[in-house]
Amino acid sequence: MKLQLALDRLTKEECFLMVEETLPYIDWIEIGTGVIKEYGMDIVREMKLRYPDIVLVADMKTCDAGQFEAQQAFDAGADIMTVMAFSHDKTIEAALSVAAEHNGQIMIDMLQVDGSGRLEELESLGATLFALHIGKDGQSAGKHTDFQKELQQFTNPKLKFALAGGITASSIPTLKGKGFDVLIIGSAITASDNPRNAAKEIQNLMK
Ligand SMILES: O=C(CO)[C@H](O)[C@H](O)COP(=O)(O)O
């Protein structure tokens, strides 16, 4: 399992400090949607220049204009960008096509899309990487989805699954061996008193 550090609700300076502190323990860096809204594609560009060898995820949460936004993300140096699962098929196809031109990947964010029906459709469009995600506001409203049940239905070894939303060190043992390839973790690291130790603990638990 890979650890994707989600940089959300941070200033640009804090994002770079956070990566510097946690670097030995993280596998992928995610520039969060709000951070991209604040600083634009420049922060994606700068992060890639600073850390060219680490997989960089631009959490664009694209839901329309797939070609244009994918071009923005990959031109800025992202290796992976996110597109919302509920987007029109044309948005998904366009983003997948731009990603292929850049040797990049599209991570489909399943936020607010329950059930495996849409996931099957997305698979048939060529999507292979999915983030099963309970959003911040959903978490605070007590939303819970049994992703495990959904995962069991997919046997295509080409499909990769990430899990996001309120994951903490104490959740890791229950998530091991459940078919997740990536754990997307933000606040449990970035809001901790000691992000380096938090990332180290989480990485050790993931092994
Ligand atoms: O995509 C996101 C919010 O939309 C977050 O990056 C993701 O949910 C991880 O953050 P946290 O661990 O703080 O829930």
Image (spheres, rainbow, N blue to C red):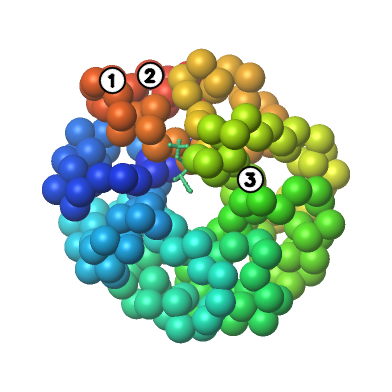
Which amino acid is tagged 1? Asn
Q: Is residue 177 left or right of residue 114?
A: left
Position of 55 relative to 86 (above/below) = above
Q: Determine crowd level at label 3: few under 14, some 14-19, many 20+ residues with C-alpha closer than 10 A.
A: many
Q: Is residue 182 visible?
A: no
Is disc 3 placed on a helix, strand or loop? strand
Label 3 and label 2: CA atoms lie apart by: 23 Å
Residue 201's mark?
2
Location of residue 191 (image quadrant): top left
Q: Nearer the viewer, residue 35 or 161?
A: 35
Position of 98 relative to 137 (above/below) = below
Pointers 2 and 1 in contact (C-beta within 8 Å):
yes
Q: Is residue 176 visible?
A: yes
Location of residue 172 (image quadrant): top right
Q: Is mark 3 within 8 Å of ligand 1?
A: no
Which amino acid is tagged 2? Glu
Residue 132's mark?
3
Q: Nearer the viewer, residue 24 or 167?
A: 167
Position of 61 relative to 100 (above/below) = above
Which numbered disc, 3 or 2, marks the residue closer to the eye?
Answer: 3
Q: Position of residue 7 (x, y in %)?
A: 33, 45
Q: Position of residue 87 (x, y in %)?
A: 65, 70
Q: Earlier in the sequence, mark 3 or mark 1?
A: 3
Is disc 1 placed on a helix, strand or loop? helix
